[in-house]
Amino acid sequence: MKKIAVFPGSFDPITKGHEEIVRRALPLFDEIIVAIGQNTSKASLFSLEQRVNWIETTFSDCPKVRVHTYEGLTVDFCRKHGAAFILRGVRNGGDYEYERSIAQMNKAMHSDVETVLLFSDLAFASIHSTIIREIIKNKGDVSQFLPLKVNVYA
């Protein structure tokens, strides 16, 4: 049976931190689905099409990575795509507590889906999409925080 992981998020935009988590997880799984969820509590700065394109471009050298979009619960998306794992990155204690709560709720809903947490490399621990969006809105340079092939100003 293939080991499939879903890496869910809004990726608005994808950051070097996101990229680092996926690349470090590649040896652990046969396939990683980067799943762009449509979060009803977040207003996106970039279109869904643009985010899909950035992720496909970022991982164009990784045949084990696919990109999908979805609405609804992540655990339901996992079951639909045969994924037994949810991959998440943790930057700090606050992230850990938040991810632990979600993992416990997901486990209660679908006991066959495990959450795997990878701790961010220190170089990427301060990168947060919300802060990146604020810098972009104020015309700042965010290139050092984004994957090489992502240009939010194009």
Image (cartoon, rainbow, N blue to C red):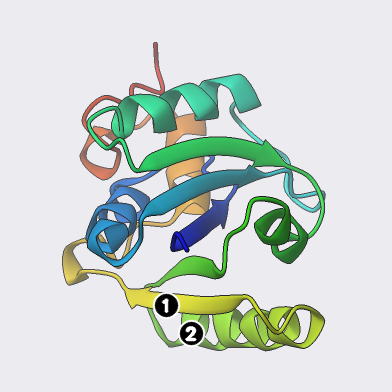
Three-letter amino acid code at the position of disc 1: Leu
Disc 1 or disc 2, which is closer to the eye? Answer: 1
Which residue corresponds to mark 2? 96
Relative to 48, is 2 on the left or the right? left
Please, what secondary structure does the residue beneath circle 1 have? strand
Which residue is tagged 1? 117
In the image, residue 2 above or below residue 141: below
Q: Could you say whether the residue bearing mark 2 is in a helix, strand or loop?
A: helix
Identify the image quadrant of the C terminus: top left
**In the image, residue 99 above or below residue 78:** below
Number of other residues with Cα within 10 Å of mark 2, as a class: few under 14, some 14 to 19, many 20 or more: some
Structural distance between the alpha carbons of marks 1 and 2: 8 Å
Q: Residue at x 52, y 28 (%)?
A: 52
**x, y (%) of residue 16?**
28, 47
* Cβ–Cβ under 8 Å for marks 1 and 2: yes
- When asked about the image quadrant of residue 21, the answer is bottom left
Residue placed most toward the observer, 39 or 81: 81
Question: Label 2 amino acid?
Answer: Tyr
From the viewer's perspective, is 38 left or right of 18? Answer: right
Q: Residues within 10 Å of mark 1 (few under 14, many from 20)?
A: some
Percent x, y of residue 125: 29, 67
Percent of width and height locating residue 4: 48, 58
Relative to 16, does residue 48 appear above or below in the rendering? above
